[in-house]
Amino acid sequence: MLKAVLFDLDGVITDTAEYHYMAWKQLASEIHIEIDREFNEMLKGVSRMESLERILRHGQRERDFTPEEKQELATKKNKQYVQLLEQVTPSDVYPGIRELLLELKTSGIHAVIASASKNAPQILRSLQLTDLFDYIVDPDEVAQGKPAPDIFLRGAEAVGATAEECIGIEDAQAGIEAIKSAQMIAVGIGDEALLMASGADVVLPTTEKLSLPFLKSLIC
Ligand code: BG6
Ligand code: MG
């Protein structure tokens, strides 16, 4: 029986995955590294510092910066990202998401945010969605980031659900891998080939067709 739905945030609840890409692209170009959308798929779902490490390795510059300088680069990217977040309003919630959250609340099924982002609480406030979630996992609460299962397992535990009673929703390859390694049903949003290759049980092109009856049909 379905007891909890665990949502990724960036790229599932709203389009902030695009803002992450814009902010990383700008920072990377300032240090003479070019990144494109294909490479960006490897950054989705991954923590801020690990994203920076991947960009530096991509540009073969991983040895060029001290830990303090890397921290400064990550802070600079986040400042740019937070500036982009100023334009987020409740109208930016992806189609079907608010309706699904209301259906979950009415049915007593827990809704949880399992995002790697430290900016998640602020984004949820800007979208006026905070009250529709029962728990927001703080990424600092868990030992390992996605693709490790930790954040999804912690979210399930926080609302008293077992893995078999949970569905995870993700737009990132690392996120789908994390859900599957937590032994939950994984719903992908976005590129079908990419997300099926990571182990998604089902992939929808957008959030529009997400509904409680659809989710219930995936779990006995
Ligand atoms: C994830 C995003 O949700 O959060 C990643 O998919 C991002 O792109 C990560 O790096 C960390 O986000 P933040 O907001 O803490 O820098
Ligand atoms: Mg995402």
Image: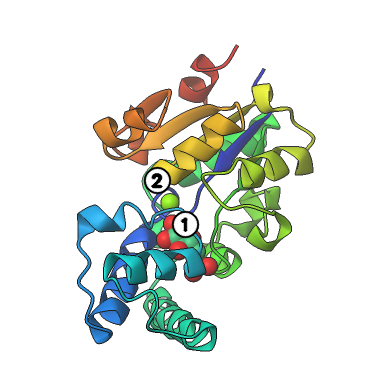
Q: Is residue 120 above or below residue 79?
A: above
Outermost residue, front side: 63
Q: Are marks 2 and 1 in contact (CB under 8 Å)?
A: yes
Residue that appears at 38% across and 50% down: 94
Q: Amino acid at mark 2?
A: Ala
Question: Is ligand 1 closer than 8 angstroms to the Cβ of mark 1?
Answer: yes
In this view, which residue lies farthest toward the top?
220
Q: Is residue 56 visible?
A: yes
Q: In the depicted view, which residue is nearer to us: 60 or 2? A: 60
Q: Which residue is mark 2?
A: 172
> Against 39, is 154 above or below?
above
For the residues marked 2 and 1, what is the alpha-carbon distance in whole angstroms? 9 Å
213 vs 152, left or right, is left
Give the position of the C terminus as an image quadrant.
Answer: top right
Whole-percent x and y of residue 176?
46, 37
**Numbered mark located on residue 166 in the image:** none
Q: Name which residue type carries label 1.
A: Val
Residue nearer the viewer, 199 or 94: 199
Quadrant hosting residue 148: top right
Instruction: Identify residue for label 1.
Output: 46
